Amino acid sequence: MPLENPLVILEGALLTAGRPLTVREMRLLFSNAYSRSDILKWLEEIQQNMYETALAHRNAHTYDVTSY
């Protein structure tokens, strides 16, 4: 049975694995309930989310040094 939000499971596995995971290993996390293309699509989403989060953090910590 597919999970409601597999991105959370996939991202958690990637962050805690301690090594790169293959797409096959990622599919096994879901008992092969999802296709290779699903996994690759979610990896792109995770990458985009991390990029946007990093950009937001950078922008939040950027300040105008000329104002001091």
Image: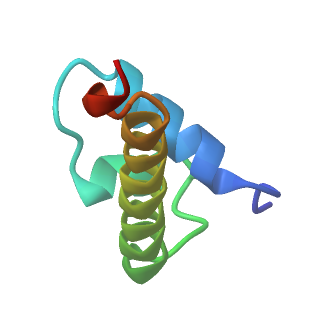
Give coordinates of residue 59: x percent, y percent: 42, 42
- Give the side of residue 29 with respect to residue 62, left or right: right
- Give the side of residue 24 with respect to residue 5, left or right: left
Residue drawn at (34%, 34%) of the image: 64
Q: Splitting the image into 4 quarters, where does residue 46 fall? A: bottom left
Rendered view: 39 above or below 35: above
Quarter the C terminus occupies: top left
Residue drawn at (36%, 53%) of the image: 51
- Give the side of residue 16 with respect to residue 9, left or right: left
Give coordinates of residue 17: x percent, y percent: 31, 23
Toward the bottom, the furthest residue is 37
Rendered view: 25 above or below 41: above
Q: How many numbered callouts? A: 0
Q: Nearer the viewer, residue 30 or 54?
A: 54
Quarter the N terminus occupies: bottom right
Give coordinates of residue 61: x percent, y percent: 42, 27
Residue drawn at (49%, 76%) of the image: 38
Q: How is the image coloured?
A: rainbow
Give coordinates of residue 36: x percent, y percent: 37, 75
Q: Splitting the image into 4 quarters, where does residue 43 fall? A: bottom left
Rendered view: 38 above or below 26: below
Residue drawn at (49%, 55%) of the image: 49
